[in-house]
């Protein structure tokens, strides 16, 4: 039990991304691994990921498995992608610092096998086609670099460490924070009876810098089955096997650039987090075509069950005090637990005029307050209560269209994700615009899409009880190419 509490306390200091989730890394992870930003083929992304009712696309299977029922031919596709991400941050009124990162990945690899089971010329209602699909779709991309820098004339991260240490003798200081700072001579005892401490940076006056490098992704293997009943009703089901890898290396640096602080020259706090996990979910969906030009439907995504998470965390504190360099390294913590992601509900609508093109509208509902965490050797009662108090229902709207100028097609799209936090202090909403074009023949197709994503948020270098928020803006550009064959 003591080890588990140490893990939670250590991870709680790892990231203070916004005030709604500062008390535990658990809450941050609960949200991170519940959020999904659907990736896939260039056609799917170029239309704003709005093809849940349009169908006949491998990526739409992850949204509504009934969309696979539109296929009348078998399909094979692959979608290599280049992502460019840029983050800008202003810390304590400083000019915006900038960092960026490139990433190459495969956004989609999918196969659909279609079989005809009834006659297209029969007037009798019947099952006409069945489809089996399998592949992998990307659900989230974690590759990013961030730089936050500015001058703090009134405080230091050590203010927080002093408050955490006060009241505890050196033998009972935290193994992953205050003990390391104590051994690095960054906090000193001033009253051994009351166990009070002071900081070597008592009044601020330091240049602060935060470097955050993250990488990894969430992907989902899918195995789907669908059917076409009389070209009116389409149904489908999917077994999903989501998995992810996430790693984060962050470094908090403070320096006496003006040489005004006695004894203190610099400090750095380096955190290394590696997380992986996998789970199982199911999706059920339907589409209905009341008239030739309209299709509507919906889907339900179960929570991801048995989502087993493995965290590994370590911390290093280095200091230059009194002209001497010191380095303290924590143990490596390895802890396993489970997350149940929330239920998702989808609504899909499409207007399609013969072969001229389509307009698609997709809606998604998810309640992040329903995320739950558990472990066999620890109760996450407080963490789950915090999730219920801080997160809320969120909505996603995706709109897009395609104009078919055979053999070329033009595409546009837009999507918007609402804020998952109840608090108005931080807005984690995001939006994307997209455009694309494609070339299609009877047996092959080549599609290209560009997706531009924008987001803003408040970011805290450490607890907001000790520092004001930094202003962060992030933009992402994804360039997606899809090569496919139909047979």
Image (tube, helix red, strand yellow):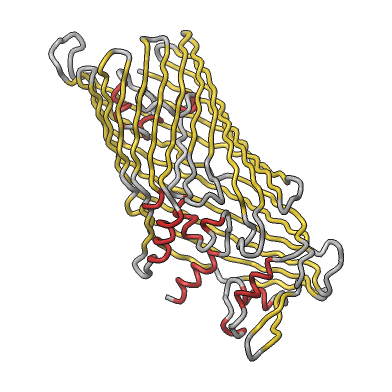
Residue 104 in the image: state x and y as whole percent.
57, 37
Q: Quadrant of residue 380?
A: bottom left
Residue 178 vs residue 209: left or right? left
Q: Residue at x 49, y 29 (%)?
A: 79
Residue located at (47% from left, 13% from top): 403
Q: Nearer the viewer, residue 357 or 116?
A: 357
**Percent x, y of residue 249:** 61, 56
Picture layout, residue 170 above or below residue 125: below
Relative to 195, say whether 141 is above or below. above
Residue furthest toward the front? 424
Q: Quadrant of residue 58?
A: top left
Quadrant location of the C terminus in the rendered image: top left
**In-front residue for pair 29/456:** 456
For the point 77% across and 70% down, the residue is 203
Q: Which quarter of the rendering shows the N terminus? A: bottom left
Q: Is residue 172 above or below residue 417?
A: below
């Amino acid at each position: 039990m003591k080890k588990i509490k140490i893990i939670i306390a250590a991870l709680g200091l790892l990231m203070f991304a916004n005030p709604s989730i500062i008390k535990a890394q658990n809450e941050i992870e609960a949200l991170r691994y519940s959020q999904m930003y659907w990736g896939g083929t260039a056609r799917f992304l170029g239309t704003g990921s709005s093809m849940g009712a349009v169908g006949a696309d491998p990526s739409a299977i992850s949204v509504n498995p009934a969309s696979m029922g539109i296929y009348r031919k078998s399909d094979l596709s692959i979608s290599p992608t280049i992502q460019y991400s840029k983050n800008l941050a202003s810390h304590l009124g400083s000019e915006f610092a900038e960092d960026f990162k490139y990433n190459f990945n495969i956004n989609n690899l999918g196969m659909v096998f279609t079989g005809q089971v009834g006659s297209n010329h029969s007037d009798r209602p019947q099952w006409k086609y069945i489809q089996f699909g399998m592949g992998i779709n990307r659900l989230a991309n974690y590759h990013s670099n961030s730089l936050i820098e500015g001058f703090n004339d009134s405080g230091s991260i050590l203010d927080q460490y002093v408050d955490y240490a006060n009241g505890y003798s050196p033998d009972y200081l935290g193994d992953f924070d205050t003990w390391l700072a104590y051994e690095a001579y960054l906090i000193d005892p001033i009253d051994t009876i009351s166990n009070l401490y002071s900081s070597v940076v008592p009044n601020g006056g330091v240049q602060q810098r935060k470097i955050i490098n993250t990488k990894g992704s969430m992907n989902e293997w899918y195995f789907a089955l669908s059917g076409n009943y009389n070209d009116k009703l389409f149904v489908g089901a999917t077994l999903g096997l989501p998995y992810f890898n996430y790693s984060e290396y962050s470094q908090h640096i403070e320096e006496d650039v003006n040489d005004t602080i006695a004894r203190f020259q610099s400090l750095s706090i380096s955190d290394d987090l590696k997380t992986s996990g996998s789970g199982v979910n199911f999706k059920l969906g339907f589409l209905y075509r009341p008239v030739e030009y309209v299709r509507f439907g919906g889907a339900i995504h179960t929570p991801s069950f048995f989502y087993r998470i493995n965290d590994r965390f370590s911390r290093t504190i280095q200091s230059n005090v009194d002209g001497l360099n010191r380095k303290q390294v924590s143990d490596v913590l390895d802890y396993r637990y489970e997350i149940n992601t929330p239920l998702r509900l989808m609504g899909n609508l499409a207007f399609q005029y013969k072969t001229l093109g389509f307009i698609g509208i997709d809606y998604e509902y998810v309640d992040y307050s329903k995320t739950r965490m558990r472990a066999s050797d620890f109760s996450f009662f407080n963490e789950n209560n915090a999730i219920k108090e801080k997160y809320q229902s969120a909505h996603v709207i995706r709109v897009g269209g395609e104009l078919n100028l055979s053999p070329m097609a033009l595409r546009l799209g837009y999507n918007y994700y609402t804020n998952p936090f109840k608090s108005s202090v931080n807005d984690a909403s995001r939006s994307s615009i997209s455009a694309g074009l494609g070339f299609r023949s009877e047996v092959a197709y080549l599609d290209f899409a560009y997706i531009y994503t924008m987001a803003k948020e408040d970011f805290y270098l450490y607890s907001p009880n000790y520092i004001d928020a930094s202003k962060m803006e992030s933009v992402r550009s994804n360039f997606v190419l899809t090569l496919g064959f139909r047979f």
